[in-house]
Amino acid sequence: MTDALIWLVAMPLAAALATLLLPRHASVVVIITGVVTTLAGGILLFAVGTQGALSYEIGGWTAGLGIALRADGLSALLLLMTALVMLAASIYASAYFSKAVERARFWPLWLLLWTSLNALLLSGDLFNLYVTLELLGLSAVVLASLGGKTAAVAAALRYLLVGLLGSMLFLAGVSLIYAGYGTLDIAALAHLIEPGPVTWTALALMTAGLLLKTALFPLHFWLPPAHASAPAPVSAVLSALVVKVAFYLVLRLWLDVFAAVVTGAAANLLGVLGAGAVLWGSWRALRAERLKLLAAYSTVAQLGYLFLFFPLLQALPSGPARDAAVGGLVILALTHGFAKAGLFMAIGVIQQRCGHDSIRDLDGTAQRLPATTFAIALAGVALIGLPPSGAFLGKWQLLAGSFATGQWLWILVTVAGSLLAAAYIFRVLGHAFGHQAYPQRPVTVAREEWPALVLTAMAMVGLGLAGAPVWRLLEGGL
Amino acid sequence: MLTAQLLYGLTGCLIVALGLRTVLLHASLLHRVVAINVLGAGVFMILVAIAYRGPGVPPDPIPHALVLTGIVVAVSATALALALARRLTAEQSND
Amino acid sequence: MTELVSSLMIVAGIGFYLAGSIGLLRLPDLYSRLHALTKADNLGLGLLAAGLALHSQDLLVAMKLLLVWLAVLAASAASAHLIARHAHRQEAGS
Amino acid sequence: MNTTGLLVFDGLLLISIVSLAWSALASPDARRSVILFMAFGLVLAVAWGRLLAPDVALAEAAIGAGLSGALLLVAVGEQSNRALQDNALRVSERNALRVRATLQWVITILCVALAATLAWALVHALDRATNERLAQIVSENLAASGVSNPVTAILLNFRAYDTLLELAVLLTAVLGILALGTARPDYQRTGPVFDGLARWLVPVLILTAGYLLWVGAHAPGGAFQAGATLAAAAVVLRLAGERSIGLPQAGALRVILAAGVGMFLVVGLTLLLLGRPFLGYPPAWAGSLILLIESAAMLAIAATLVLAFLGGRPPAIAVNEENNRC
């Protein structure tokens, strides 16, 4: 059973080599990888649900000397989301890239990115996390540059430098931890950790590095150009997964490994930055001229909500109320992952079919691409946080936690952010519904439109209904 | 605590700060790439200083292995940054 | 006795290095700088290697040091030639 | 050596390291900056040697200073590469300059604070000195690792998974470089002196690479140092104006690039299917399996570094890809 952990890393990595050596059979390899990783993710989730956290010691060496892979409810949920989003995005990408030479370049890097996502979510070793962060950063940068135009390359270059700076800061923190505690194993460290200069400085450095990578306001400056100028399938996973796993690492460090030394003031600081992200990101999304830029700024805002949970979790005593808040946080993150991936793919369809993604010129899109417009509407509902989307459950917990701890500021921010989100989504939909005759079929280009539709439906209905099992999985986890 | 550990470790801290300053100062791209490499060298210096155990005593090999990995990752990233810069120049002259 | 000779050689080697470095900083043009650098440094390294070889009292180590010296000799000769030729051609061009 | 002498040596070494770092970063001239950075790397290698880290010293000299320096230098040498040398912030107005001066001060103070905090934490960390334990565990398990050089044991056995992902990072970088553009044009032939040097240097470098690979099992060395040395041989050939620098044709090149990660995966997964843990070598086989993985890794590393030096797809691959177009 625990072999599933190593297969989740080895499978996409082997597939990357296969697509490099046999470019003609790449699509088959990718689909098989997607199906197998999704199954492995499902099995893992089931196993974690029934047996609790799993670990796998690579090479048979005890963790500490060697490196252990670990999975608990949180990482298993994110792994399954990664598998589903990557599978859908792969199907979409096989239609998006029309030239053989483009696909030959794209697939190996895509699978290397996939490897790094899984490896990061499973890693139980601080230095190994640094290596996975670099693999994630480099593969994401190359994929983002595949757009090839000046804007894409310039944005990718900035993305690379920011990412490198982030991982170097992270590594500096890891070095301090090794100097002070003599171990890199996360589980061992969680038992040893104690307040003091080493711990605080290390946590500050690692967090600063990760906040750069997860683009928390005001360190978000690199994200909109990079996400808006990348090819659509790449934008989808950059926004839905790549920044999300960096956030996962912040969560892991703050609520798990370093939980004993995190102070209320530090958590409040993250909350304030999150509030800034919600307001600034939503405002810029409202003012955006292009759909892709809107979606990118909306990512900045949605990440902000996730950081609003930190002061709540710090203030809530452990118990059902806190567990509920953790569940809300995870559901919000998952919903955003599905919804934003779907949104970017839908935008990609519009961009390729209409030749542009300017919001003002969308008139009639609802008639020409009804399924895609519907996917955008579904994603929009999830981004605003209306029922029955998973985001509604998440935001509900955010509000409930704020009431319970008397932190009124976050309530105001959440409400303001949601109103702004409603405004920018309805602005898009208002333009999309014009007056033209309806076509015969709702879905006009299947391979391109279905993935977005399925993902956004997941965000809307799937996660709304799956709330209870998610909570059960996370119980007592963080 | 050994004097050499302290000396080299503190120099590492200084070099990290020197590198970071240039990265943040919006210097030319080349200088920023060099600066990130310098920053990394500072971190590596801290790691190698941690590993040192005094003359004649075998040092801790784990930080050495980590630094070796770090050096290879740094050169990969540098190579990629330079390739991106080259492509950017090509695209700009096309525009 | 050998200890004394080896120390003297090392000190002399460092002296040549010093001279070469001063030459690099103080001499007026590229050719004379190259001249100071390659000649003095090669001799300095040779003395240093010989001194260390004597100090080690080990034939294998001495051979390795000799190899180091030969490699540097070849590399510095070739690079000095390339630099000088490049400078010469630029002068001729302009 | 006596303690005072060593202290003076340390002091001089550290002063030159800091001043080289400073002048490399402060020099406005790109080429000078790169050359100072290479000097910084070489002096750093001396420092690694001083701290009894010969493996790191070799890698730093070959990769950190040598190949990074060569990559930077050849990039600066391209006169047309404006993106590299343009200032990110094109400010000409006085007002903006004043803002910039203030920003400069803020950043400088921030960095001083960072250095102070880091130093404060490091002093506390060194005071605790708890990492004896893990080094102890490493030496206890060294006999079962298949090699006697502890650094190689960590890189290819205990923490082999790190190295696998590190090779994946290298693969990502080289695929990125291949995707981004075509190789720089060949150099002119350099004439008899450099040719003469290359003629005997290249075989020596190849021999050295083989030696470093082999010796890594029990002494400083290993796949990365060997790969970098092999790449250096190709760089020398290219600088001498050779057209063929040992890179194979497109198909075989892809196999070599994939070989590093590939051999790791083949060994790891075979062991997994045989009922052992992933990368859990049987002690009797460990030495040979490590050498097998390292040999493949060396070729992949060398090919990657050479392609990075070329700066893109060699002409053969570029042509091959055009044919694939639909």
Image (cartoon, rainbow, N blue to C red):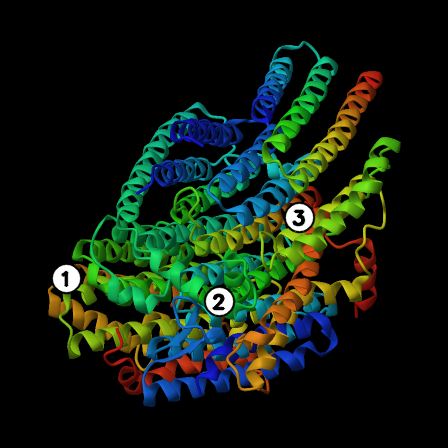
Label pair 2/1, CB-CB below 8 angstroms:
no
Label pair 1/3, CB-CB below 8 angstroms:
no
Q: Are marks 1 and 3 on the same chain?
A: no
The answer to which of C82 and D1 lies nearer the viewer is D1
Residue designated by label 2:
D158
Q: Nearer the viewer, mark 3 or mark 2?
A: 2
Percent of width and height locating residue B13: 38, 39
Find numbered disc 2 in the image and state the secondary structure of the residue it sits on: helix
Badge 2: residue crowd in 10 Å (few <14, some 14–19, many ≥20): many
Q: Chain of mark 2?
A: D
* Side (left or right) of D166 relative to A220: right
Find numbered disc 1 in the image and state the secondary structure of the residue it sits on: helix
* Side (left or right) of B77 relative to A60: right
Q: Nearer the viewer, mark 1 or mark 3?
A: 3
Residue A251 in sight here: no
Residue designated by label 3:
B87
Q: Are marks 2 and 1 on the same chain?
A: no
Q: CA distance from mark 2 to mark 1?
A: 50 Å
Viewport quadrant of the N terminus of chain D: top left
Q: Residue at x 40, y 58 (%)?
A: D135
Residue D199 vs A94, above or below: the answer is: above
Percent of width and height locating residue A473: 30, 83
Q: Residue at x 69, y 48 (%)?
A: D229
Q: CA distance from mark 1 to mark 3?
A: 50 Å
Residue D280 vs D253, above or below: the answer is: below
Residue type at mark 3?
Arg
Label pair 3/2, CB-CB below 8 angstroms:
no
